[in-house]
Image (tube, rainbow, N blue to C red):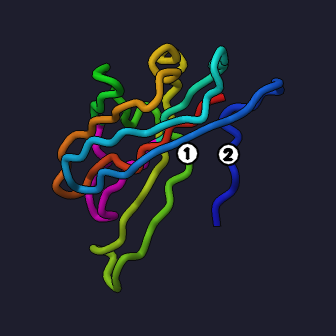
Amino acid sequence: MSQQINYYSDNFYGGVTGAGFNPGYSLVNSSISFNIPNNSTIKKAFLFATSKKYMEEASFLDSITIKINGIDLSIGNQHAINNNYIYKRGFSPSDYIEHKTLVKDITYLSSILNQTPITVESTLQPDLPAIMHYYIIIL
């Protein structure tokens, strides 16, 4: 069983919006839109991703670079929060997949996040270890 991890908290008058996509093991680009009213100020923005590896592999992928509206953005082990969990995909431990959540503060990109839809370009990852399941949350 896993517990909730408080990564960020704040009290403010406003709203929260988010969107994401999963490229899987293919080279896929996606346009995602956020519900941001005109003249809004972005207080905080976070990129979430999932790092995966087979349980028997030595380590997770160190990092990956994706593009958000053409701007390179690196996310990897240095952004991990302590919530590793295992998905039992088969009957053998060689089929078990270990996951961990990555979180990166991307508030500095607020000027492009305010111009939806935005384009997210992923990197081809044919197998594990891989970093995928991208989600952006904006406060």
The x and y percentages for residue 63 are 30, 35
Asked whether the beta carbons under mark 1 and mark 2 sit within 8 Å of each other, the answer is: yes
Disc 1/disc 2 C-alpha distance (Å): 8 Å
Which residue occupies 31% across, 82% down? 92
Q: Which residue is mark 2?
A: 5
Residue at (40% x, 30% y) in the render: 118
Q: Quadrant of the N terminus?
A: bottom right
Using a 10 Å C-alpha cutoff, classify the residue at mark 2 as few (fewer than 14 neighbours), some (14 to 19) or many (20 or more): few
Tell me what residue is drawn at x 39 percent, y 37 percent.
77
* Magenta highlight range: 49-62
Tell me what residue is drawn at x 49 percent, y 47 percent. 101
In the image, is residue 88 above or below residue 131? Answer: below
Q: Amino acid at mark 2?
A: Ile
Image coordinates for residue 22, horizontal then vertical, percent: 37, 52
Seen from the viewer's position, the closer of residues 62 and 69 is 69
N-terminal-most mark, 1 or 2? 2
Q: Position of residue 137 (x, y in %)?
A: 57, 36
- Using the rendered view, name the quadrant where residue 15 is placed: top right
Q: Which residue is mark 1?
A: 82
Which quarter of the rendered picture does the C terminus lie within?
Answer: top right
Position of residue 130 in the picture relative to residue 4 (left or right): left
Between 53 and 14, the one lying in front of the other is: 14
SS assignment at label 1: loop
Horizontal side of 16 relative to 76 (left or right) equals right
Q: Is residue 50 magenta?
A: yes
